[in-house]
Amino acid sequence: MTRFQANMLLLTSGAMWGMGFVAQSTAMEAIGPFLFIGLRFAIATLSMLPFALREGRQAEHKLVSADWRNFALIGVLLFGGMASQQVGLLTTSVTNSGFLTGLYVVMVPFFGVILFRQFPHPVVWPSAMLALVGIWLLSGGGAISLAIGDWLTILCAAFWACQVLLIARSASHTGRPVTLAVSQFAVTAVIALAVALFIEPIEWNAILAAAPEILYAGIFSGGIAFTLQVVGQRYTTGPQAAIFLSTEAVFAAAFAAIFLAERIPAAGLVGCALIFAAILIVEIVPPLLRGRRPAPAE
């Protein structure tokens, strides 16, 4: 798979997550955040499990205990990101949440340098900042006042950044992207359902009322989108992946306009343009710079 194809998979993930934001906001009217997360990722696990089993039968090498530990850790990070984002939406606005979640675009290269001494291509830094400004404009371009929900959403961005970095390392190392995806789904589902059993009411009528949102979030924005993320990250870098995945904000705004009658202001349209500009810069500039390097002397 080429880097361009991998980045297109990540762009598709962003589109599915954008639609999933609509499902998340409407499902919360019927059920609690942890029950929604648990059911969503239980469905994601079941929907992708056959592909993971097939991948395991065709694999040339078996996974070792260290691989399973990494997969479980990624699952814990996924739960942390989903839980802090979902609970944060209870006490913050969608505008603040959309902008603050996008902070992971900047956190990924920053954490990569601190944790793994991975220095990205220089063009990633201005592109990440450009995407962040685009997300800010898409969110309204106003001042951000930090409430408890805002701090939870910043924590969510940190979880996402760590998850993206660890996936980039584990997916390329093990060559088992679908198994990794299903493992993180299962870990997230178990933790979320365990929490929901203790702190949230569980009513079948409420679950049935939220069933369409749960099914979409489980199969598409959960199972398929997160699996595409893991597959795509085998062939691109973590910082570049973060920029492509940040298109979630653009697609969320577009689907909200279609399904929830929300309208994007002029500043939001400029933000969309900046995000896509950041994508084009990351996609086009590195190959151009490599092509202009002089050939080494013999």
Image (tube, rainbow, N blue to C red):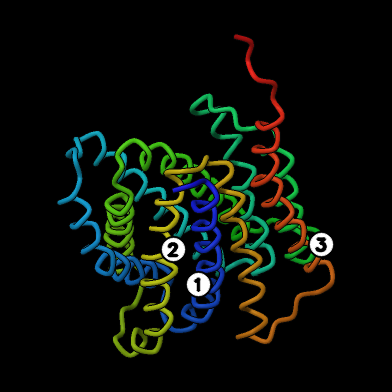
Question: How far from the left and from the top, in percent, is residue 100?
Answer: 65, 55
Disc 3 crowd, CA 10 A, few/some/many (<14, 14-19, 20+): few
Quarter of the image holding residue 296? top right
The residue wearing badge 2 is 225
Identified by mark 2, the residue type is Ala
Q: Nearer the viewer, residue 58 or 120?
A: 58
The residue wearing badge 1 is 20
Viewer-nearest of discs 3 and 1: 1
265 to the left or right of 68: right
Viewer-nearest of discs 2 and 1: 2
Q: Nearer the viewer, residue 32 or 238?
A: 238
Identified by mark 3, the residue type is Gly
- The reply to whether dot 3 and dot 2 touch (C-beta < 8 Å) is no
In the displayed orientation, state which residue is furthest to the right: 266
Of the image marks 2 and 1, the number of the one nearer the N terminus:
1
Give the alpha-carbon distance from disc 3 to disc 2, as whole Å. Answer: 30 Å
Question: How far from the left and from the top, in percent, is residue 159?
Answer: 49, 47
Rendered view: 42 above or below 127: below
Identified by mark 1, the residue type is Gly
Secondary structure at numbered mark 2: helix
Secondary structure at numbered mark 1: helix
Please give the name of the residue rendered at 43% of the width and 80% of the height, measured from the top-left corner: 213
287 to the left or right of 55: right
Please give the name of the residue rendered at 63% of the width and 62% of the height, measured from the top-left corner: 97
- The reply to whether dot 2 and dot 1 touch (C-beta < 8 Å) is yes
Secondary structure at numbered mark 3: loop
Question: How far from the left and from the top, in percent, is residue 208?
Answer: 34, 88
Quarter of the image holding residue 288? top right
Question: How far from the left and from the top, in percent, is residue 47?
Answer: 28, 69
30 to the left or right of 97: left
